[in-house]
Image (cartoon, rainbow, N blue to C red):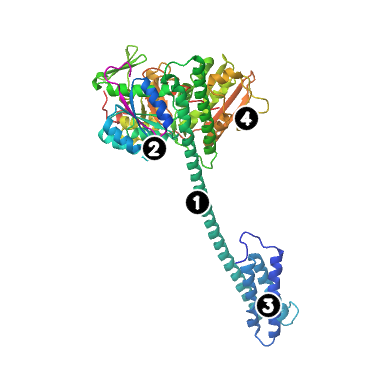
C-alpha cells in the first residue's frame, strides 16, 4: 500500500478523497433515472474504500460524509439542493454513512496492525544488530587488550631482568633499564585506560556486580598506593557499620586509586590527603571523598577535568615520580565513566582553605539478610 | 632456590610469548631453579610427563588450546603447584583458574619481584612436610592448628566456629589467594556460594580481632573480584606500586 504509515494525511489527501467522491458522482449522473437510487448509492462506498486504503482515516471519514452530501445533492429529488422530499431517503443516507464509516474503521484497524507488526520486526532487527555490534566491539577490545599486554609484559620484564642475566650493571645502565621498564608500564597503563574507557562507554558496560564492603575498597586502594603515599600524611575517616554496595570490585578500587593518584600528583610532598566515607541513609547513598591541600583546581574548570586528556598543572616532576607514572590524562575520565555506570555521581570542587576535593556518591541497594546466627548451623569447630 | 638444600627445583614454563619466556627463565634461574620451556600446549603436555617438574608456570591463552584444559587434566593425577599467567583482565577467568585447581595467578604485566615471591611461596609449600605447619604466626597472632587456639600477643582470642574455619582456610593457603567460592563452601557449605555478603561481614570481624588496625589490614588482604589472601609477612610484594602501575 502506498500510504506511509507514519505520515499524517494533509490537505492534498482530503482533496484527492473529494475528487474520488466527485468522480463517482459524475459516473453515476448518466444512470440517474435508469437505476434505483439505492443502487447508485452503492457506488459511493467504493470511493470511501479507496480513500481509506490509499489516503488514511481522516480523508476516508471526510469522503463518507461528502458521499452522503453529493448523493443528496445530485440524485435525490429535488435535484441540486440538499433538501429531501421523501423521508425514506434518510434511511439510504444512514445506511450509506454506516457502511462507509465501518469500511473506514476496518481498513484503519488493518493498517494499524500492519504498522505495529512492521515496527516490531524493525525493532527486533535493530536490537539484533546492536547485540551483534556490541559483541564484535567487546571481542575486538578484548583481543586488542591481550595483544598489547603480552609484548609490554615481555618488554618490562626483560628490562627488569637485565641485571639478573649477568654481572651487576653499572649505575647508568641500571638506570636505563629501569627507564625502559617504567616506559613499558606507562604504555601499558595508557593502552589499558583507553581500552577500559572504550569498554565503559559502550551502551551496556559489563559490570561484575557483587556485595562489597566500602572498608575493603578503601583498604585495597590504600594498600595498592601505599608506596606512593609515603611522602604524604593520610587522614582516614572510616566509620564502622557502613552499608554494603552492589558494585564491580575491580572497577571501584580503580576509582579510589585514580583519585588517590590524582591527589598525590597535585599535592607537594609533606602535604595532607584526606579520605572520608559517609553513609546517608535517607538518600540511600554512600559518599566517598578524597581531598588534598595541594594546588587546587583551575577556577571554572571543575567539571572539565573529567574530560579525556585534560590535566591540571602538576607539582613538578617529583610528584610524577612519586606515583611512578606521568599520568595518562584518562584517570578522572575513567573515574566518571565507572561511577556513572554504577548509577552514581562524582563532583570536584576547590576547598576554601586551598586544595581540591573529589566527592563520589554511590547508591546502596536494600541490604541483604545477615548471615544466620552460628548456633543455627551444625558445628564442626571447637 | 639458592638457600634450599638438595637438588635445584625444576620449573616447567608453558608460555607462547618468547619475550616473556626469556625473562621468566632469567628470573627463575637467578633464584637457582632449573627451567624447562614449552611454547604450546602439546609440547607442554609431553614435558609435564617427562620432566615431572616441582612447579608449573602456565599461560592460559596458548595457540593450540586453553591452558585451563591442561590444568584440568593435570589435577586428575597430580597436586603439583601451578602458577597461572593471565593476560586476561577479567577477574572471572582468574577465579575460574583458581577454582579449577591453580594455586595462584599473576596478571600481565607482572614484575620480577612479584613472580619470584609467588614462586618461592609455592615451592616452599610444596617442599615442606605437611605436618610441620601445626603452628602459624603472622604479626602478633599465633594460630595453633593442633590445639585449635588463636592468640594475639600471647592473649587468647575468641573466634566463633565460622571465623575459625575461615581463618583455617586462609592459613592453609597462606600467601595464596583463596577464592570467594572456596571460602563460602568451606565455611558455610556448597549451598551458600552466592552469599558473598556473609564473607564481608565475617572478614570484617576477623580483621577487628586480628589486625593491628582493622581499617588498614596488613595480613587479611582483599583481592578485588577474586577472594582473600593471608599475608604472613605484612605487605607482600603482591601489589607493590612497581608491579601495578597507577592510572593517570
Q: Residue A115 lies in what quarter of the image? A: bottom right
Do pointers 3 and 2 mark residues of a single chain?
A: no
Count of numbered marks: 4
Question: Which residue corresponds to mark 1?
Answer: A128
Give the CA distance from mark 3 to mark 4: 73 Å
Do pointers 1 and 4 mark residues of a single chain?
A: yes
Give the CA distance from mark 1 to mark 4: 37 Å
Residue in front for this viewpoint, A257 or A31: A257
Residue in front for this viewpoint, A125 or A359: A125
Classify mark 4: residues with Cα within 10 Å, few (<14), some (14-19) or many (20+): some
Q: Are marks 3 and 1 in contact (CB under 8 Å)?
A: no
Q: Nearer the viewer, mark 1 or mark 4?
A: 4
Subunit of mark 1?
Answer: A
Residue A295 lies within the magenta run: no
**If the image is split into quadrants, where does the N terminus of chain A sit?**
bottom right
User: Is B216 placed left or right of A86 in the picture?
Assistant: left
* Residue A118: percent from left, percent from top: 54, 59
Q: Which mark is residue A24?
A: 3
State which tag comes first along the sequence, 3 or 1.
3
Give the CA distance from mark 3 to mark 1: 49 Å
Classify mark 1: residues with Cα within 10 Å, few (<14), some (14-19) or many (20+): few
Give the CA distance from mark 3 to mark 2: 80 Å
Look at the image and give the residue range highlighted in magenta: B1-17
Do pointers 3 and 4 mark residues of a single chain?
A: yes
Amino acid at each position: 500500500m502506498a500510504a506511509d504509515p507514519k505520515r499524517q494525511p494533509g490537505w492534498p489527501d482530503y482533496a484527492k478523497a473529494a475528487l474520488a467522491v466527485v468522480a463517482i458522482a459524475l459516473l453515476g449522473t448518466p444512470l440517474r433515472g435508469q437505476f434505483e437510487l439505492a443502487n447508485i448509492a452503492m457506488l459511493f462506498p467504493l470511493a470511501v474504500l479507496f480513500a481509506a486504503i490509499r489516503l488514511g482515516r481522516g480523508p476516508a471519514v471526510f469522503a463518507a460524509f461528502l458521499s452522503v452530501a453529493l448523493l443528496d445533492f445530485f440524485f435525490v429529488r429535488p435535484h441540486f439542493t440538499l433538501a429531501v422530499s421523501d423521508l425514506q431517503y434518510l434511511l439510504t443516507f444512514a445506511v450509506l454513512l454506516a457502511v462507509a464509516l465501518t469500511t473506514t474503521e476496518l481498513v484503519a484497524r488493518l493498517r494499524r496492525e500492519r504498522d505495529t507488526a512492521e515496527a516490531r520486526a524493525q525493532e527486533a532487527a535493530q536490537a539484533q544488530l546492536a547485540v551483534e555490534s556490541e559483541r564484535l566491539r567487546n571481542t575486538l577490545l578484548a583481543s586488542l587488550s591481550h595483544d598489547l599486554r603480552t609484548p609490554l609484559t615481555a618488554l618490562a620484564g626483560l628490562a627488569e631482568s637485565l641485571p639478573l642475566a649477568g654481572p651487576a650493571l653499572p649505575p647508568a645502565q641500571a638506570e636505563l633499564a629501569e627507564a625502559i621498564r617504567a616506559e613499558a608500564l606507562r604504555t601499558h597503563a595508557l593502552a589499558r585506560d583507553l581500552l577500559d574507557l572504550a569498554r565503559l562507554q559502550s551502551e551496556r558496560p559489563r559490570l561484575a556486580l557483587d556485595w562489597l564492603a566500602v572498608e575493603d575498597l578503601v583498604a585495597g586502594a590504600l594498600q595498592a598506593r601505599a608506596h606512593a603515599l609515603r611522602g604524604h600524611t593520610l587522614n582516614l575517616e572510616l566509620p564502622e557499620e557502613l552499608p554494603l554496595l552492589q558494585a564491580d570490585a575491580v572497577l571501584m578500587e580503580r576509582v579510589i586509586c585514580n583519585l588517590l593518584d590524582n591527589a598525590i600528583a597535585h599535592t607537594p610532598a609533606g602535604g595532607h590527603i584526606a579520605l572520608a566515607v559517609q553513609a546517608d541513609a535517607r538518600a540511600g547513598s554512600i559518599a566517598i571523598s578524597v581531598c588534598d591541600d595541594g594546588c587546587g583546581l583551575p577556577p571554572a574548570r571543575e567539571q572539565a577535568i573529567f574530560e579525556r586528556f585534560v590535566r591540571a598543572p602538576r607539582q613538578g616532576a617529583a610528584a610524577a615520580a612519586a606515583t611512578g607514572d606521568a599520568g595518562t590524562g584518562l584517570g578522572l575520565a575513567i573515574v566518571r565513566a565507572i561511577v556513572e555506570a554504577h548509577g552514581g555521581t562524582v563532583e570536584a570542587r576547590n576547598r576554601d582553605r586551598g586544595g581540591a576535593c573529589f566527592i563520589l556518591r554511590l547508591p546502596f541497594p536494600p541490604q541483604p539478610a545477615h548471615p544466620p546466627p552460628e548456633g543455627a548451623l551444625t558445628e564442626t569447630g571447637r | 632456590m639458592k638457600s634450599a638444600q638438595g637438588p635445584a627445583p625444576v620449573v616447567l614454563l608453558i608460555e607462547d610469548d618468547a619475550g616473556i619466556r626469556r625473562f621468566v627463565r632469567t628470573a627463575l634461574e637467578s633464584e637457582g631453579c632449573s627451567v624447562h620451556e614449552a611454547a604450546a600446549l602439546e609440547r607442554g603436555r609431553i614435558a609435564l610427563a617427562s620432566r615431572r617438574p616441582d612447579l608449573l608456570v602456565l599461560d592460559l591463552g596458548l595457540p593450540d588450546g586453553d591452558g585451563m584444559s591442561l590444568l584440568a587434566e593435570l589435577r586428575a593425577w597430580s597436586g603439583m603447584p601451578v602458577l597461572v599467567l593471565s593476560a586476561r583482565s577479567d577477574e572471572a577467568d582468574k577465579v575460574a583458574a583458581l577454582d579449577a585447581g591453580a594455586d595462584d595467578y599473576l596478571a600481565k604485566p607482572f614484575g620480577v619481584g612479584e613472580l619470584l615471591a609467588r614462586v618461592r611461596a609455592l615451592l616452599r609449600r610444596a617442599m615442606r612436610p605437611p605436618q610441620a605447619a601445626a603452628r602459624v604466626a603472622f604479626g602478633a597472632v599465633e594460630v595453633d592448628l593442633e590445639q585449635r587456639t588463636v592468640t594475639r600477643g600471647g592473649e587468647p582470642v575468641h573466634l566463633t566456629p565460622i571465623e575459625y574455619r575461615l581463618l583455617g582456610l586462609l592459613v592453609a593457603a597462606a600467601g595464596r589467594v583463596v577464592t570467594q567460592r572456596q571460602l563460602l563452601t568451606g565455611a558455610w557449605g556448597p549451598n551458600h556460594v552466592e552469599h558473598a555478603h556473609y564473607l564481608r561481614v565475617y572478614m570484617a570481624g576477623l580483621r577487628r580481632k586480628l589486625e593491628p588496625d582493622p581499617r588498614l589490614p596488613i595480613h587479611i588482604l582483599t583481592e578485588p573480584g577474586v577472594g582473600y589472601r593471608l599475608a604472613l609477612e605484612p605487605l607482600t610484594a603482591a601489589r607493590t606500586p612497581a608491579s601495578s602501575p597507577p592510572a593517570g
